[in-house]
Amino acid sequence: MFSKKSFAGFITAILFVALAVSPAMAAKNFKNLAFMGGYVERHPTPVRCWMPWIEQAKKDTNGELTFNYFSDGTLYPIKEAFNAVSDGRTDFGTVRASLFPGSMNLMGVMDLPGLAPNAIIGALVGQEVVEQFPEVREEFPKNTVPYFCWASAAYNLHTIKQIKNLDDLKGKKIIVWDATTLEVIKLLGGNPIRLESPDTYLALSKAMADGVYCPIAPIRSFKITEACKFHMVVNLGTGSFNMFANKTLWDSMPQNLRQWLIDNGGKKMSLAVGKSLEDGQKDDIAWMEKQGHTLTYPDDAERARWIAKLAPFKEQWIKDCVSRGIKEESARKVLKFVEERVQFHIQEMRKGAYGDYKV
């Protein structure tokens, strides 16, 4: 049996350990804050964007504001991200709307196939959606401050034999990695095969499939480039991500640190992350071209044929929103805004507003 004195000491020790392992509570003042970015440290976005940002924060604030970077699964399982950004298990953390159906419904518009054609446009429009619509922000995790939004690299088709247009895809066996891309390939006229990403190369090397539908970024690491020498760069949509700050932490910050975060977050960070992903893709494409790969870029008319096939995703998204208690008018308003802003940023990109990027 514990005495009252020893029991009190035991409880004190437990509380001390709990505080020691909680990133938000462990931060001394505002040093060593946990930044849960998701990507492994060698990924282009941490290398080109977030690590320099972390160094700049330390420099500009004379060491008052510092961060430790964490990739997915190191602080908590990805499936707990929605709650983890609220309860202080991380100070800044990533939530992907598509992983939490029924929670961030309106933000899910940015995951619709056929909308954003690359990471820069997806990031910018996603951030604009957050800033424009209070109803979008109302679905975000409690006790958080939305810090910035970004988007994945776009999805493309990588095949053993060349596909020059939509008609060439008909009946082809195409590997996909999730339920959404499975439906994409169905609508486009292909025959989808659901596999895990690490199993893709083996299936392709044994001629069990004609190609795979995924972003360019992972195909080299999964050895897909050894089997697929042809790439239809049709850019059929991106996936969205949101970075949140814990509000309790945010509100406790002195104004100078909070202002630094404001000045260096939001749309500025969205654009920077988008560029890091597009620059990484440029490097991958340059490498593939040196290896003798063939990349096909459809013109606007041909790409429009592919996009038109994906229209059912939009109506299904509207229905899903309504079934979850969202007014149809609100969902359609968000979708219309996204469509208009995507077209705006496409034109801006073609003018060179964001640098030397194709769209």
Image: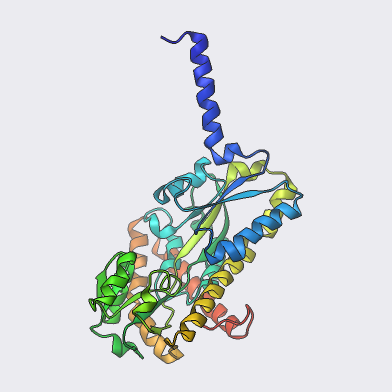
* Residue 159, above or below 39: below
| Residue 258 in the image, given as x and y percentages of width and height | 69, 50
Residue in front for this viewpoint, 59 or 327: 59
* Residue 84, above or below 45: above
> The N terminus is located in which quarter?
top left
| Residue 41 in the image, given as x and y percentages of width and height | 53, 58
Instruction: Name the residue at 43% across, 58% down.
Output: 97
Q: Number of numbered discs present?
A: 0
* Residue 326, above or below 351: above
Scheme of colours in the image? rainbow
Residue in front for this viewpoint, 88 or 69: 69
Instruction: Name the residue at 26% across, 82% down.
Output: 189
Instruction: Name the residue at 46% across, 61% down.
Output: 107
Instruction: Name the residue at 54% across, 21% down.
Output: 12
| Residue 179 in the image, given as x and y percentages of width and height | 30, 65
Q: Is residue 152 left or right of residue 350?
A: left
* Residue 40, above or below 224: above
| Residue 65 in the image, given as x and y percentages of width and height | 69, 48
